[in-house]
Amino acid sequence: MTLISSTALLSALLVAVMLHPIPARAEDGTPALARDIPEPSQCKVQPRPLAFFEGLASTPGTDEVSSPEATATTTPLTPPTEGRVNEATLAAITATIRELVACRNANDLLRTDALYTDAFFFRQIAVSGPPNLEFLTERATPVPLEEHMWAGIEAIRGVRFLPDGRVSGIVDLHLPSEDVTFAFVFAPVGDRWLVDGETVLSRSSAGG
């Protein structure tokens, strides 16, 4: 369902608490000096229940969706230019990104999807139709990727508050076959930030 798990990253091969933070600064989003490769063991979020996707598959149309997140304002995914975030927010965003990549390296689709908002999926089905339940069921018991297939974070930069209170930022990822730059939008849900939007800004052959 998600670009990072089911499309861009998966097709390329395929943390509630911050762990080993990337040295980015809230002031200017300075990129990390070394590639950060979150291990599968750092994917700790509870998996999104299959029942959620079964509900999406049976939803006739987005007009009948009652999730409070489904009406969230959508902001175009462009490089952020709004207000700078503080260190605590940057740490929280970084934690989400690191766990997102860790879950991808764990090949754990349902835990990856748990790091996205409900509203993200409701918008997705409006564009691409209901989820593939057979595929999701098959992936419910994941087998972690071999280490040489893990993704790594090159940089987290340009993290900014948007006018609606969400946060956007740019993430440079290294995959075994290519380097991909994503623009993400994050929304506060409970005690953490979840991905509320994403798009690929650029991709190129991996530089090693």
Image (tube, rainbow, N blue to C red):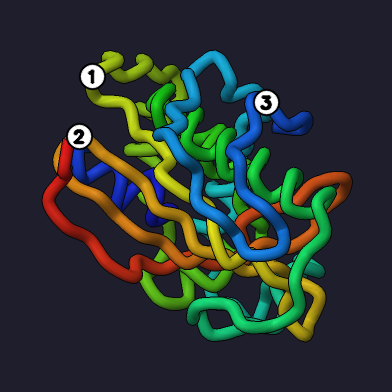
Q: Secondary structure at mark 3?
A: loop
**Sequence-wise first label, 2 or 3:** 3
Expressed as whole percent of the image width and height from the top left, the position of residue 90 reads 73, 52
Q: Is residue 95 left or right of residue 43?
A: right
Residue 49, position in %: x, y? 62, 36
Q: Position of residue 104 (x, y in %)?
A: 42, 33
Q: Quadrant of the C terminus?
A: top left
Which label's residue is closer to the chain start, 1 or 2?
Answer: 1
The residue wearing badge 3 is 19
* Crowd rating for badge 2 (residues with CA inside 10 Å; few <14, some 14–19, many 20+): some
Q: Please name the residue shown 62% across and 83% down the image.
A: 81
For label 1, the SS is helix
Q: Residue at x 48, y 19 (%)?
A: 40
* Alpha carbons under labels 2 and 3: distance apart: 23 Å
Amino acid type of the residue that numbered disc 3 sits on in the rendered structure? Leu
Q: State the image quarter where residue 95 is shown.
A: top right
Say whether marks 3 and 1 touch (CB < 8 Å): no
The picture places residue 197, in percent across and down from the top left corner, at: 55, 67
| Residue 176's disc number | 2
Residue on which disc 1 sits = 148
Whether residue 159 sits left or right of residue 78 in the image: it is right
| Circle 1 crowding by C-alpha within 10 Å: few under 14, some 14–19, many from 20 | few
> 29 above or below 165?
above
Q: Residues within 10 Å of mark 3 (few under 14, many from 20)?
A: some
The dot on residue 74 is none
